[in-house]
Structures are given as C-alpha cells and as structure tokens.
Image (spheres, coloured by chain):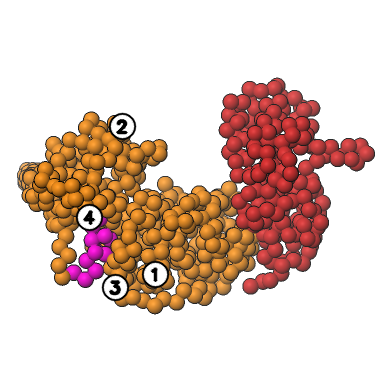
Chain colours: A orange, B red
Amino acid sequence: MITALRIIGALVLLAVIGAGLLFWSAGKEVRIPPASVDFAALTTDQHDRLIERGEWVARASDCAACHSDPDGGSDLSGGLPMVTPMGSIYGTNITPSREYGIGDWSPDDLYRAVAVGVAPGGRNLYPAMPYTSYHRITREDSDALWLWLMQQEPVDKPNRKNDMVFPFNIRPAISFWNALFRPEPAPFDAQGRPNAQGEYLVDVLGHCGECHTPRNAAYALTPDHLAGNVIEGAYAPDLRADALVSRGWNHSDLNSFLHRGLSPQGVMTFRMFPVLSHSTSHLPQQDLDAIASYLMPDQPVTDLAARRPSAALSSRGQDLYTGLCAGCHGDDGQGQPHSSVRLDVNTTAMFDDPINLVRVIAEGIPERDLAHGERMQAMPAFADMLSDADMASLVSYLRQRWGGQSDDVSAEQVQDALARAH
Amino acid sequence: MAERISFSAVINGQKVGPMDLPHDLMMVELLQEYLNLTGTRLSCGQGVCSACTIIVDDAEKGSYTVPACVTGVAWLNGKSVRTIEGIAGRDEQGGPVPSPIQRAFLEHFSFQCSYCTPGFVNGATVLVERLQRQPIASDQVEAAILEALDRHICRCTGYVRYYQAVRDVILSTPGLTTDGPQFDMVARQEVTQ
C-alpha cells in the first residue's frame, strides 16, 4: 500500500514538473525577426506601396473571415462567432480603435500576435487565430499589414466575451497547447520552392488547412495536410491533387471558382462564401493561377463528362429528383446559367460524407451575388417537405447518379448529418 | 429512365386521373395544357417570383405552397392540390363567392394587372390556414405577413395594399390571433369554407 502511494506520489510529482516545464517553455519569450522597414523614414512612394501590399496581405489572409461584424458593420470590428467543440469564440476588433481595437499595437505586437499567437501583455490568443499557419508569414508582409490596418477607420466597439466551456476558458492554459502544437515562427522563404507563391497563399496567408486539414483529439492540425475535414457543421473537402483530379477539377475551373465563386464543379457555399467575398474574389489572376498550380502541380486534362450511375437508381429517388429538383437543375442535371448550379458534375454528391448534400437540400441557400457579376438564385429549403426516408432516397439518388457513390444513405445517416450541422 | 408516369391527384376537390403523362412534366403545364386550369400564372419559370404558387393539402402537416413552374407532377402524384380556381366558395345558385382573402384584395384595390394575384391569394390563404392552427399575437401579424408573402413579386401596384388586405383579414377574423376578436364558431366556419 505504502509502495503504491509512493509510486502515485512520484507520478504526480513528475506530472507537475512536466506540466511546469511545458508551461515555462511555451511562456518564454519567442524570438521574432526585427521590423523590415523604418516606418518613420518611408518616402511617400514607399508608404503607398506598403499600404497596397498591406491590403493584399489582408485580403489574401482573409482577416475579415473572422474579424468582420456580423451585424453589417466594419469588416474588421469583430463579433463573428466561430463554433468549436470547446465553445464559441468571437472574432475581435482589429480596427485601430485605441480603446477596443489594436490602435496601440506596434508592428512587433502585430507580428507576435499573427505568427506566435500572443497579444500584448503576454495574453495567449486561442488557436482559432490561425497562427499555426501564419507562423510562416514574412516580416515584410506583417509590417505591410500593420501599416494598412492602422490606416483603417477605427471602430469603438467592445469585443464580445467568448463562450468557452471549462477548462478551455482559462487562457493561460493555452500555453500547454502551444508547447505541444505551436510551430516556431519561420518566415517563408520562396527560394528554391516550386510554386512558392501558391504555397504561400494556400498554406500561410490563405490558411486553407485550418478548415481543410483533419484535426486530432486536441484540436490541433494533423500531418494529413489538406485531406478534408468536417468543421463547423460542413465538410471542407480534400484538396490534395489526386482528390481534386478525381472530382473533376482543373486549373481553369479552380481559378473560376476562386474568382467568381462558381464553376461546373460547384458554388461557394457554407463558410467558403465569405471567403469568396472577402478574399479570393479580390486576388489577381496570377495569384489564383499560383494557387491552382500549387494544389494541382501537374496540369491535368480532366474530362468533365458526368459520371455513369454507380448503382441501380431507385424510382423513389427519381420521382423526388424530377418532382422537386429538375425544374431548376434540369432532368439531365445541367442547371441554368446564373440561377441554378449543374448537378451532373457537381462535387458535393461525390464526397463520402453526405453532410453537405443533406444540409443544402434541408436548409436551402440564400440568393447570392457571388463575384464579378456572377450570381445564383435562392435554393429553397426542403426540410419541411421531406421525411428523413425521402431525404435519404433523394441523397442516395444524387450520389449514385452523378457522385460515383454506390452505397445507399440511410435515414439514420440523414439524421446524423443534420445533428452534426450545428 | 422511366419516361412516363401514371398520375392521379385531387385537384380542387375533384379526382383527376389516372393520366399517362411525361415523367418530367411540371405542374403548371399539367394545369394549363391538360386540364385547362389557366388561372395559375407562369412567369419566371424558375421558382422565384411566386406567381404560379399553388397549395398542397397534407393531412398531417396542413396546407403549404409550392411553385407550380418547377414542381413536377412526379412530386404531386397522389396528393391533394388547390389552385386559384378552387379558392372561391359557391352560393346556393352555384355562383362564385370570393374567399375572405379574395374579397379583401378586391376591397383594398390590391392589384392592377393581376398577373401575380393568384399567387398572392394562395400564399395568403395558406398563411390564414396556418394561423387557424397556430394563432399568434396581433403585434406579430405584420412580421408573419412579411415572412409569408415576401417571396411574391408584384410589378404594378407595389405591395402595400396586398399587405393591408391580409392584415385586415387576420386581425378581424376570430381565432387567428391570440389577443384579437373572440373565438367565434360561425366566423371560423366562414373562413374555412
């Protein structure tokens, strides 16, 4: 008995020492690169060019995706919720308001927040701030972003308190997570990297992996980079080259998807719609080409023809499709320009997880102005008209007719998808 | 793919079918081209303007609307449907008696060209029927009308007189609001006829 107690005591002591070491190692000052410019010595021309670069960084990094005001105010004044399994986190005010925003931050402060995840005063940011991706931002781009942010209209709007559940509401405890999962700041070096611009846009500024990469039990990114992940109630698809090719993507369509929000393979939906409006629709064509080249290094020649049915199609599924969907999407799934998407080559029916397909049919999609003149009419919500069994028949029909998925989706899977939706 | 469908339904209380129809036929085509029920208006043809709104009566869910232009006979097969031709009642001589919603639209001069009116009548009728099942407080009526009729597009008169007419019907009909006129069995029967 005494021996057992001694062993337990020793283990507890070791755990306390280990935790202390972890906390100390994460809490110690991280060395950061020095400022890239002397802001006081900038000529007007240099200043203007830096502002222009800063705006590009803000767009490419999609700051507004999390920091915009959901009530229609500034794109930077915060309040947008991010729903995580640990609770909701609200985007903060990053306007130069001195009282509520980042008006008092120095360029070093911004770099430390973006690349290290630590705000002035040593306050840990939640990893919802994607510093695990931004840790490779260049100091030049962080400085340009700082200058651009400081030029924006200050909005005196207080931050909303996060609704995190215990123990995740203890900010200092994030130091443990940081010790285990936070990479050191490592400014991106384009030298010798093929598709460097695309890699920088996808993996660093665009932080695509934050949604598209699976997470582990500690909610940290796994090494399965861009392998697809269900997050915030929707499936963020597999973006690895083989998966993109198998779903019928090519450079031109990927470019169109990011530029206008639409391609034959689908339309920007769920949390990708704000990504379009705040970020990718503003990027120049060469950036979109770079993204496509990085994601799909070997320019594939993809046959966009619809797949052949992968199973015998049910007459119930066909009745539901013809009765409720074909009026807009066409009996052959060809859709209509600027109003309803093609379904015959749409990738949503191709995913293993039916969650996106179930949600779109159940909830509908609002009418949307996409970008550069592209638009889509509203997709009605059919949740009230379809039983789970009917939804299962319709979803199975779409997946089997065009998605290359041969299995039947059950009513239980429909319920499960809807339960995971929010 | 099956190209034909054996279609049967109850339309305005009359049994229709079985009919041998193209499987991909849209309901507005059936009504206009096969049944000579031309009151349902085809306008946008893509389920956006609500001019072609018809009513489906479901024994469990109650009544709800669908756009006839993009809703196929494959969905409506076996169902009970009302179109604008089935909304008015009949007097003892068999002459038409406008429903409360139709009468209110006439009294309020709600429409001009009338192309959108059948859709508005059906949309408002379903709203009234929903309120019979689930009355709301009178201060919520305007929001409920907006929510129910917002999708209906009118290009002549604007929407104010449609909304005023529907609001008058709801606020003056017993049983539709929780704090409105007292429940009155006779008036309730008039509404449901």
For mark 1, what is the residue? A252
For mark 4, what is the residue? A133
Quarter holding the N terminus of chain B is bottom right
Residue located at (41% from left, 67% from top): A253
Question: Mark 2, chain letter?
Answer: A
Place of residue B75 in the rendered image (x, y in percent of width and height, measured from the top left): 66, 58
The first of marks 1 and 2 along the sequence is: 2
For mark 3, what is the residue? A297
Q: Marks 1/3: CA distance? A: 13 Å
Q: Which residues are magenta?
A: A193-205
Q: Secondary structure at mark 4?
A: helix
Whether discs 4 and 1 lie on one chain: the answer is: yes
Q: Tell me the kind of residue under disc 1.
A: Ser
Mark carried by residue A157: 2
Q: Are marks 4 and 1 in contact (CB under 8 Å)?
A: no
Q: Quadrant of residue B113?
A: top right
